[in-house]
Amino acid sequence: MKNIAVLVSGGGTNLQALIDAEKRGDIKNGKITCVISSKADAYAIERAKKAGIPAVVMPRKEYANSKDYSEAILAELNKQKADLVVLAGFMTILDECVTKAYPYKIINVHPALIPSFCGEGYYGLKVHEAALAYGVKISGATVHFVNEKADAGAIILQGAVDVANDDTPESLQLKIMQNVEWKLLPKAVSLFCEDRITVKDGKAFVDL
């Protein structure tokens, strides 16, 4: 059974999707053993408490720089004996000391079809605003491994939705969360915990 640590910063809807999936038995050979929040007032902490999952608050603002914060996060992950780290709306880019300590063991979900609308500066509604401004006909989400570059790690799963003519950034965000993120993130976590993802030449291959 693999220990899953989930890093959060906000409302925790993706965390809730993981909690619900675990309750349904959809996450095989894995258990969410801790939630780490970069904000003390994140609602995700309440979600963790309701599910009986230990939550650790590590406010980003209490650390001088990204490296100091990342080293503290790394120490906590080691303390928690994390086998997999899931970024679920975690709004801090971690220093390479974390990604190098957990190579191909950190998963993130990005609300676009990478390599479109990704990288530094593309987060939250900004992603959907950019997609709509470009006039895309489909959008979606990508579950990927995390490396030293923002949104540049090996792609594990992707899913798409149609973009309607009257979609707003908010409606597109909700559509992608409900139809793609909340389904694919738990699926990718389970695949990892079942050892059904292999990486070769920087690409992830999934045994579905």
Image (cartoon, rainbow, N blue to C red):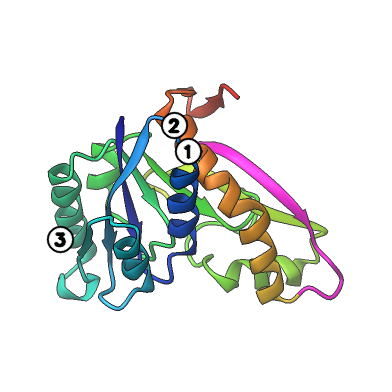
The amino acid type, in three-letter code, at marker 2 is Lys
153 drawn magenta: yes
Q: In which quarter of the view is residue 40 placed?
A: bottom left
**Sequence order check: which comes first, mark 2 or mark 3?**
2
Distance between mark 2 and mark 3 Cα atoms? 34 Å
Q: Which residue is nearer to you in this view: 92 or 109?
A: 109
The amino acid type, in three-letter code, at marker 1 is Gly
- To which residue does mark 3 refer? 68
Q: Quadrant of the C terminus?
A: top right
Q: Are marks 2 and 1 in contact (CB under 8 Å)?
A: yes
Q: Secondary structure at mark 3?
A: helix
- To which residue does mark 2 refer? 28
159 drawn magenta: yes
Of all residues, the one furthest to the right in this rendering is: 165
Q: Which residue is nearer to you in this view: 63 or 158?
A: 158
The stretch of residues the image draws in magenta is: 152-167
For the point 47% across and 62% down, the residue is 120
Instruction: Give the percent coordinates (x, y) of residue 85.
Output: 33, 45
Residue 1 visible, this orientation: yes
- Mark 2 vs mark 1, foreground winner is 1
Instruction: Give the percent coordinates (x, y) of residue 114.
Output: 61, 48
Distance between mark 2 and mark 1 Cα atoms? 7 Å
- To which residue does mark 1 refer? 25
Instruction: Give the percent coordinates (x, y) of residue 28.
Output: 44, 31
